[in-house]
Amino acid sequence: MECNFLGHTFSTRFLICTLRKRDYADLQSGTWKTLMETVAQDARYMWETGVQSGCNPRYWGIVVGIIGDWPFLHKCAGFERSFNNIQKKVRVRKAPVGICHLCQAGQVDCPFEQIETRRPIWASTEFVQDPFAQPSPFTTQLLCVPGEEAGLFQFDWFHTMSLGVLKHYLGSVIALMSDQEQQGSIDERFASLSEKYRRWCHQNSERAFVMRLTKESINWENRSTYPTGSLHRGALSTVLMKWVASRFASETFPNEPLLSLAADACAAIQRCTRIIYRSGLWLEAGQCRLVAELGFQFLRRYSQMATMAKNDQRCFFIYQPKIHSLHHFCMTLWKAHQRNTWAVNPLGFSCQQSEDFIGRPSRLARRVTPQTPVLRRIMERYLLRAYREFVRSRYLVRPGWDEYKHSEDLTTFNSLRSISHSFKATSSTLSIMPRIQGVTWSTVGEENHLLQQLWGAWLKVANPWNLMKWKTSGFPRKPRVSTLTLYF
């Protein structure tokens, strides 16, 4: 069984609802609670009753985990303990309530910063204290392990690493690397570092995402503040980690012991990430041991770097709550190894694909008038796009489409190929994409009659119900350049 990462997100995820912010913010805060209760009731119906298809088999759906970024989990479940409750001062009037809904980390005598060990104090406090401010509709409607209801809400690997721990790690590493440049001012040193980064991206065919690395891009105002990294995309963290790893492999930094430890940490977490991305949904006991040990190695090096920087009165390698989430991932896999059982791949609780899915209806929403019925129009546009992707993925079969491939219409499709040969003879290009059911080509000069032939031939093949887009520049005027694109 593989992780659900392949394919268009419209074909692997479903849109439940769309809401304007004013519908659930401020005085309308009850709307969010009602929405969560409705979703929980529908999920209960799926595991209790299920749905029956036209072929008579019945299917059931069981929710094994709820994932999302940390603010969503906090709002969705109504936790009393989350990252919002981190202690920000040395002395406080009220005892801290903790930062984790799974354990008591962050409370008195239970530090979440204890990441250098496999036996942290908080390990014995898992599921001891109820984290809910009031009963959650999900824990009352869905199947949960008795006494471990909070375990239904899982940390997300994507936000924990690419948009969390690695941002803080990269911020400090890039700041330290900038100090190794020979230029005088800090801006000149970062300019030299940016040039090396762009050159590496070009040589290795990697997308840079940013053209300049600056002290602002890592949130490093001055040397009395921690560089936390303001990386706006998870893919940027991935590319920067590859670049940093290549520099550590080809260079040494004898004058900076922090970078020597950072090299070990980088090698460990990069290998850990490669293993889980190349594995399926389930990890056997041996894989759990290897991934957990690599994660523990990264955490030990991070703790050593933070301690060394603090002793030298330097602001590098900050502790943030998300590093506690990584510790939980490692501890879960290590316990599975000790029990000699299989465990779920951390990517099974990763939602980068869901983040991609959220962005697509959001873009559709920006193309809909805000007047009533805006929410209905968004859902209708989403259904149109989802229908197209379902057809492409062969989840839905259009009437007559399978028969077409073995019918006389195949002769019509072959006529497209013959037209393509005539275009090649006139130094123009034609591309027919099978299974994507689209045609794209460009033509120059006096060949618009061939364009008309192809248009007529394609209409004989295409289903009138298909969504088609005709994008043309200059057609049928001549001798302008014309472009035709069909897709559905």
Image (spheres, rainbow, N blue to C red):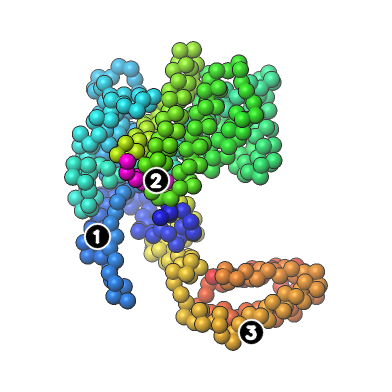
10 Å neighbourhood of mark 1: few (<14), some, or many (≥20)? some
Residue at x-position 39% and y-position 24%: 116
**Of residues 333 and 214, the one drawn nearer to the viewer in this rendering:** 333
Q: Where residue 209 appears, x then y in whole percent? A: 60, 42
Of residues 419 and 189, which is closer to you in this image?
Answer: 419
Q: Amino acid at mark 3?
A: Thr
Residue placed under numbered mark 2 in the picture = 283
Q: Which of marks 1 and 3 precedes in the sequence?
A: 1
Q: Is residue 384 visible?
A: no
State the mark number for residue 260: none
Residue on which the image places disc 3: 411
Residue 119 position, x and y percent, is 31, 27
Residue 167 on image: x %, y %: 49, 33
| Residue visible at 22% across and 48% down in the picture | 144
Mark 3 vs mark 2, foreground winner is 2
Q: Which residues are magenta?
A: 340-350
Tag 3's secondary structure? helix
Q: Quadrant of the C terminus?
A: bottom right
Circle 2: residue type: Leu
Residue holding disc 1: 47
The residue depicted at 35 percent of the width and 50 percent of the height is 22
